[in-house]
Image (cartoon, helix red, strand yellow):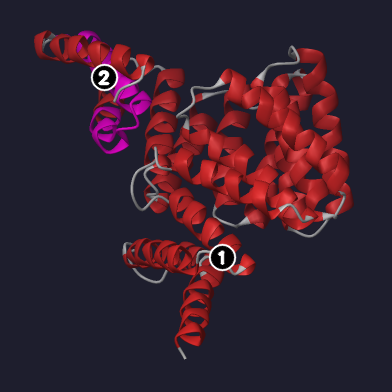
Amino acid sequence: MLNARARELTVAERYARKLAETADPASPAEQLRAVWLLGDILRDLNRFDEAETYYRARLQLVLATLPQDAERVLNAHDALAANLQHQGKVEAAEAQFRAAVAWAEQGFPSGHLAIARSYSNLAVHLLQLMRPIEAETLFRQAFAVVTRTEPDGAIAARLLSNLAATAAMLGRAGEAEQLQRKSIAIIEKLYPAGHTAVAEGYRGLAALLESQAQFQEAERLARRALAIYTAALPPDAAFLQIPYETLAQILDRKGAPGEAEALYRKARAAASALPTGHRERIKADAQLARHLTERGAMLPESRTLNRDAAVWATARLFSYVGFTEAAKVEMRTYRSLFQGVLKTNWLLSQRIR
């Protein structure tokens, strides 16, 4: 059953398709307006595979329009890259993010914020692929550009948070915490208390503190972040998976397995809005399965979750063209998942004996 927002978007899709059908073939501007609108509507309906067609058409149209508008071309590359990322097409997404960087460096003067944005977008993607060394270099380049003009602005705050996540991944926990607290100090001056940017600052710090076993402050921050997110976002927003998982992991380590399980289940439900086989859906299944296995509870369900996740993880690995570095990195992230398949099957076999 569609919620109110989805119903409105479905109506908007119908009219956007009519707009596309009636666009003048001789008018690139009309065609661009139609494919741009339809792509964004399909994205908001979580139909990323269909949206990709329109984002590719949008990119081709802005490249073909003379004189070329540098900002429009950059935005079109970024939109297609984000779409591919949502579908889990990580290599294709990286190619588009790199194309955006090349275009920004070519189309804008040195020190322009558009260049910093392109560096940051590529770096975030690389960080998600567990490539922190490459990501850190790009984040620092972006930060150097931004601090020349807006050292206390929203972009600087976001880059500080990204640098914190990178430092944490590289094992520099103390530095990561300092960077995240600096980011929050800027964010709290820029946004009202209920803004999602504030929530993300709190959530990021909570995750860092959890990794240092500072559970009391971590839990307090994670609960504040989740409260803001659930008040600000639609209940079926896929992004809610992240704050649910952050709090679940803290409670898991703190010794509150019942509440942690409920949150892992909410995270999995949120992730179901993503395409089947998406990395985040695989992660949501694997985390709930791991939690249930460690508790020795619901082992048949844990086995099913692990098996389903393993099937999609294997399919993702086979989707790579060759055993590239990106494929190797992703394969390593599934090590614990495949171990979980073995563990649940072994535990269930012990019950049969």
| Region rendered in magenta | 27-56
Determine whether, in the image, residue 298 is placed left or right of residue 168.
left
How dense is the environment of label 1, judged by Cα within 10 Å: few (below 14), some, or many (20 and up)?
A: few
Residue under the point 67% across and 23% down: 228
> Eyeballing the image, is 160 above or below 280?
above
| Residue 145 in sight from this viewpoint | no
Q: Quadrant of residue 171?
A: bottom right
Identify the amino acid type marked 2: Leu
Q: Which mark is residue 297?
A: 1
Q: Nearer the viewer, mark 1 or mark 2?
A: 1
- For disc 2, the marked residue is 38
Q: Is residue 38 magenta?
A: yes
Q: Residues within 10 Å of mark 2 (few under 14, many from 20)?
A: many
Q: In this rendered view, identify the residue nearer to me: 91 or 336.
A: 336
Q: Quadrant of residue 156?
A: top right
Which residue is drawn at the image coordinates 32% and 35% (left, top)? Answer: 48
**Residue in the image at 63% along x and 68% along y:** 294
**103 drawn magenta:** no
Q: Position of residue 190 (x, y in %)?
A: 77, 14
Q: What SS does tag 2 mark? A: helix
What is the magenta segment's predominant secondary structure?
helix
Residue 22 image position (x, y, % from top left):
10, 8
